[in-house]
Amino acid sequence: MKKIGIIGSGAVGKALGKGFLKYGYDTTIASRSEEKRAALITEIGGSIKTAGFSETAKSAEIIILAVKGSIARNVIEQCGIENFSGKTVIDTTNPIADSPPQNGVLKYFTSLENSLMEDLQSMNTKAHFVKAFSSVGSSLMVDPNFDGLKPGMFICGNNEDAKKEVQTILLKFGWEVEDMGMAEAARAIEPLAMLWCIPGMREGKWSHAFKLLKK
Ligand SMILES: NC(=O)c1ccc[n+]([C@@H]2O[C@H](COP(=O)([O-])OP(=O)(O)OC[C@H]3O[C@@H](n4cnc5c(N)ncnc54)[C@H](OP(=O)(O)O)[C@@H]3O)[C@@H](O)[C@H]2O)c1
């Protein structure tokens, strides 16, 4: 199994860190702060490793990007763009604007003609970005329990082998995979997080996931 490097120590980084360890992956999670890194070892437990951004990106064979959308470009630069070359990058980020939500609807800094993932892919042409985990809460990312019903994870990206790698991970983590095609599909997938958050923002309900019904 490939070595996992998680760039981001927030709720998503921690949830996926626990998940990758559970499924036997050699996993490193990154933070800029030594203090935070020590806390992550206690919080995540198991055999989790920690390191700085560039060290984590360099040693990883699959990179998970789990930072605030508005700083994602900057974080990739801090990691070293060359450390992404040839690797699958699981992009969990959403382009959430700093302005407050309106009646429970998040605001985005992208438009329907461009997505954050396309922007990140264009600055890293040798990396293989795959959008995943962006439209569900961190507590449901690994082994989501809906009484035996598997929810669907929407993914997209330009590299078929990278998407196959992500599909293998998602199947282990308890998801059905809905491949929506090339990177442009992120224009539709990223706004699903707006929809996912509305019941939470309006009614405090955060325990749901999407599923595509098919005949
Ligand atoms: N929370 C969810 O349930 C959820 C669900 C789906 C998708 N998402 C998306 O997933 C992404 C991660 O969300 P999150 O809530 O886990 O984490 P977050 O709080 O958005 O980000 C945490 C990480 O951002 C880094 N960071 C903050 N400011 C920075 C800066 N100026 N330069 C470099 N790094 C900086 C922190 O690094 P240090 O450790 O060094 O401080 C930390 O690792 C977001 O794009 C979010 O929209 C979240």
Image (cartoon, rainbow, N blue to C red):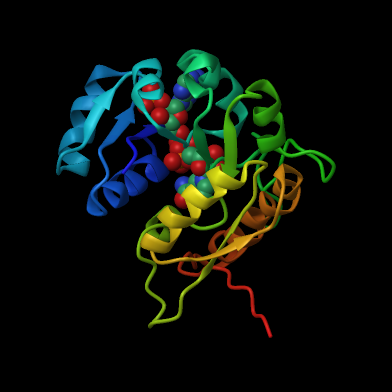
Report whether 126 appears left or right of 142: right
Q: How many marks?
A: 0
Report whether 211 appears left or right of 10: right
Asked where in the image residue 27 lies, by quadrant, the reply is top left
Q: Quadrant of the N terminus?
A: top left
Instruction: From this view, report whether residue 197 is shown above or below residue 108.
Output: below
Report whether 59 appears left or right of 62: left
Seen at 53% across and 33% down, the residue is: 68
Query: Seen from this angle, which residue lies furthest right?
Result: 113
Q: Quadrant of the C terminus?
A: bottom right
Seen at 51% across and 21% down, the residue is: 75
Residue 58: where, in percent of width, then height?
39, 19
Seen at 67% across and 41% down, the residue is: 158
Asked where in the image residue 210 lies, by quadrant, the reply is bottom right
Residue 182: where, in percent of width, then height?
72, 47
Instruction: From this view, report whether residue 188 is shown above or below residue 99.
Output: below
Front residue of this view, candidates 60 and 212 = 60
Front residue of this view, candidates 190 and 175 = 175
Residue 212: where, in percent of width, then height?
63, 73
Front residue of this view, candidates 209 and 58 = 58
Instruction: From this view, report whether residue 131 is shown above or below residue 69.
Output: below
Seen at 47% across and 18% down, the residue is: 83
